[in-house]
Image: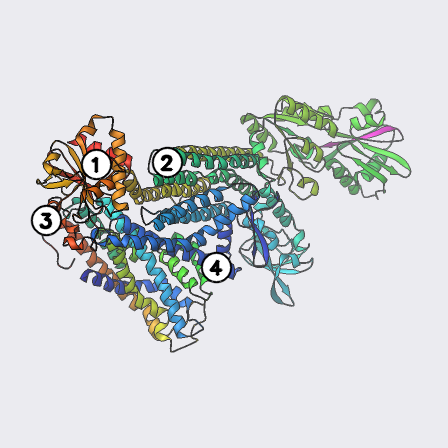
Amino acid sequence: MNTAATCSHCWLPIGRLGQAREVNGKTHRFCCYGCCLAYQVHHGEHEEPEAASLLIRLGVGGFLAMNIMVFSLLLYSGTFSAADEWLAGPIHWLLWILATPLLLILGGPFMGGAWRAAQQGQVTTDTLVSIGVLAAYGYSAYQVVLGSGTVYFDTATMILVLFTLGRYLEAQGRVRAARSLVPMLAAERAEVRTVIDGKDTTQAVSAVQPGAVVRVLPGERIAVDGIVVEGRSHCDEAILTGQFEVQPKAPGARIHAGSINGAGQLLVRATSAGTNTQWVRISRLVREALARKSLTGDMVDGVAAVFIPFVLLLAAGSLWFWSGRVAFDQALLTALAVLVVACPCSLGLAAPLAITLGIGQAAQRGILIRGGGVLEKLARLKALAFDKTGTLTQGKPELATIVVNDATEREVLWRAAALALASEHPLARAIARERAAWGSAIPVAGEVQAHPGAGITGNIDGEYCAMGSRAFMASLGWTIGQGSMKADAEGNTVVYVGWRGRARGLIALSDPMLPEAAAVISALRARGLETLLLSGDREEAVARVAAALNIAKWRSELMPEGKVQALQQWTQRRGAIAMVGDGLNDGPVLAAASVGIAVGGATDLARESADVTLPLGALKSLPWLLGLAARVRRSILKNLAWALGYNAIALSLAVAGMLQPVIAAGLMAGSSLLVVMRSLRANRYPLVAVVFCVLGLEMITPVHADHARLQQVNRAFEAWPVGDYALTDQYGKTFTTRRVQGRWTFILLGDTHCAERCKAPLSALAGMYQRIGGTKAITTTQVLFVSFDPQGDTPALLQKYLAPFDSRFIGATAPWQTLKRLADDLSMSARLPESPEMVSAGSKSYHGSLLLMGPDGTVRGEFLPPFDVLLLTAEYLKTRARK
Amino acid sequence: MTQYLLLFLAGVAGSFHCVGMCGGFACAMGSDPRGPVATLRRHLVYNLGRVMTYCFLGALVGYLGVLLVGHGGESTPASLAQRALAVVSGLLMVFIGLQFFGFFRRFSPGLTGVGGELLVPALRELLKTSGIAAPLAFGVLNGFLPCPLVYAFAAQAAASGGPASGFLTMAAFGLGTFPAMLMMGGIGIWWRPGFRQPGAVPVSLHPARGAVLRSGWRVQGMRVAGGFIVVLGLITLARGVLPMTAHVHGI
């Protein structure tokens, strides 16, 4: 797995099962099928054959699916009943013919994904969907070949359609979340309008070289660093500096890549190569940040890896459990629902969405967060440690005084300036500035060595000189000197300068505090965070700042190693602590903290290694940042809770057999949609609409429930009395229908040549006899099989026919006229052939008709296929109880 | 049977509205370089896809309508719920029909609504491909674009009493839109080969098509469509309101 890769569509990390696709000549990697779909649909301009073929797939698949659904609907609603019954068979075949290409068109990607996962020894939701759909399809095909039963091609169809739709919606959700980041992420691929020989040419930003002239139109995002040559406008640089006020730009003003141009057109001369801008660097950082898996992401991945096999086991278990208790196809549907409803998708989505949004929001203010894990750590902080110089202070120290021991001020400053040139430390730069102000030439120091956070040593005119903090002088073994040298410089920052073994002067610099520092510190304390001040400066200076800002704990005169130690001690005893510094001189210190925050913008490689970079002057954003981290964490937890809760409830319902597979698929798609909507707080697709759709699905699919969960009874001719007829039973005895008085009689019509249509009810009745055998009901129940083939069916044949079922069954026949009158009474004569001769050739639609007669000799209703022992028994007992 | 004829005519009338939104697509799909027969086939397949979507929707809402008012196969003619459905359906149709005249505009859903934005640019890609599958897919997806005309007839289908009749209702309506859409596709004008650049939106038009697109014609056409829908709605309403014994002829 490539941990640094992001999906080309949604910019989120590619999980274990990313797909690589060749798109328009470039290899793109996608994190999932949905993103693959969505990318191609939306980048149609660039990938003509791909996008078109994908949409064709969707469109043709949709066409087939709709046909399947229409015919299935017609079947369910009983449009083909009675006279048109023969149509049911051909329609089943038609459904199979339509479903096969559909399986290939829409199901292909899922099955391909499952296969790829299987090759890596893993199971994913693709596996679940594929197994479910193939099971439904296979079972239905089997039923079609057998010529009996209900088919579930529409279930398989709807599942495929809903899953494809669900994947597409998820991908779109991710794209929307990253929308605010898109211009940033696309920085390297931006195009600019270069003016060459007076004509505008469009170029990629990577082709821009220093000195090129670029035209920037109003409202455009500027893609180059440069200086305005012509034109006036205002630029919005918030994304770089965090300042929301627009900056006026006139000829000679500096332009930064990434800012947005205002209302005027500008001609800009580039000062750096197109890909060498801070904007491009930021873009790379953000892309890396998105690719970094967060801690939650890793945890969720681990959970998903266990969850899916668990679901498979659960589905198999449900199938095994229910197939002993209900009809097999109902058990199959239950297992299918279990497979389909389990959706680790929402688990997997919960964290990345919220994190992407969080990173995007921070980026809008110029704050760069280096990964989702950082946001999580920020939310769990217990304390923040601050560096003093440049972080809490303005970082532009000014010379206060020079106190010398046994040298002139000039000598001290002269040497200090020479050494200071080699350091980026604000104190050093201040000193160098000061010396330059005096005007004399600054000597060049050789063999300069900067000791970060401590001091600088070098060779001036052959003398070994050093400049730095008191601790540094002590570490060199140089004495500070007495007298005036020890003079307290009123809490200012003091830098000692020495040569030839002794400190010979000190330069006191005053570094005023940032005005917002006090507000920031109190805001942090209001959040319940502890604050710590770590500085290499003198004790008095540090104490003064700490007192002013109300920081309870502080340590002074620390070398970098000391700061690191202090942080480690704190972490050990108290918990997560962040370090806020300028990132230039305290790289290792920032790295030692749980979160390293660099203030000052990511203009330096040193700063780039910090976990978070705030733009220059953005200390005041710190409370906001912590608030963001807390919000993101809450959002992730809520999403996770929702996803887990949904899975728990949905799985329970599915295992209990209360969920139809199509509803399950709808719930799955709906859950993904809901997680996306929650994260985006989108108002355009109200929750109500989603619930409505799921309810709508619920309405369509209970047909399966009705057909399979209830014994269908037609009570159209209830309470119709049946006259008395004399039949001859299988033992040659006369059977009068008066014998039915006082008993509940099942009357089954057919003849001994009747195969499936009579045997099914007979075996169901035999099973029912078994079940009620020990109860009182059995004594008042009887089964009468009436054969409508008096010539062909002798008593012996009847006996032989009924023997395998139950010896208590009565088989009887009678002369044709008697049978016809009986059929009239039973309202079955419409189904009979015209004459006995036509019995073998004519319509067999009366075969398998099962009626129930009550003890009073009236018909109670006709039981309709399919016949299931349990359901039949239940319905029979219910009818008995109703009297 | 006369009912379906009425629906067919309503579809013809309503297709003036179709011309506005979907006509652009048909134009852009243009003529097939392989000649008039291939062009005809293209457009027929496209419209087949579109009408199939409508028929599916019709069957679906027809089925839902039956579900709402009682189990299919056991519907008693005088069922109160069925009549209530007819009333609601009729009112909805009258409402939508009046929208064509300009009333109640505030309540109309965005015509080029939500799904449209997503699909339309992607759909344009399909236009450039050759073969049968592309126009079919295009038609199918096109049929799902939101359209008040479709909603009106779907309301009719819902009250029609079953998925089969719902299917036929929308089929009649869909077939009614065939002539106008085929014309927009340039079928009637295939004596001018090479007229269209595939993929370009029409700027200069053949006079007949231009006339149709000109606002005068369109507004009239919309009014006619609206009128038909209002009439159909009133008939459906009557079916629900009047007692069953007063059988309205032909419905």
Q: Position of residue A617 (x, y in %)?
A: 62, 39
Report the magenta residues as a range.
A501-511
Q: Are marks 4 and 3 on the same chain?
A: yes
The residue beneath circle 3 is A817
Question: Residue A53, which numbered label?
Answer: 4
Q: Which residue is mark 2?
A: A323
Q: Please tell me which residue lies in front, A515 or A88.
A: A88
Rendered position, B121 above or below A113 = below
Residue A317: name its quadrant.
Answer: top left
Drawn side of residue B104 relative to residue A293, left or right: left
Which mark is first along the chain, 2 or 1? 2
Element at label 2: helix
Same subunit, labels 2 and 4: the answer reads yes
Q: Toward the viewer: B165 or A147? A: A147
Separation of marks 3 and 2 at Cα, in angstroms: 45 Å
Question: In front: mark 4 or mark 3?
Answer: 3
Q: Earlier in the sequence, mark 3 or mark 2?
A: 2
Q: Same chain for the residues at labels 3 and 2, yes or no?
A: yes
Judging by the rendered image, the residue that carries numbered circle 1 is: A809
Could you say which is closer to the camera, residue B206 or residue A673? A673
**Quarter occupied by residue A848:** top left
**Disc number lying in front (2 or 4):** 2
Alpha carbon distance from label 2 to label 4: 42 Å
* Magenta span main SS: strand
Nearer mark to the viewer, of 1 and 2: 1
| Horizontal relation, residue B105 to residue A836: left or right | right
Assign a secondary structure to mark 1.
Answer: loop
Q: N-terminal of the two: label 4 or label 3? A: 4
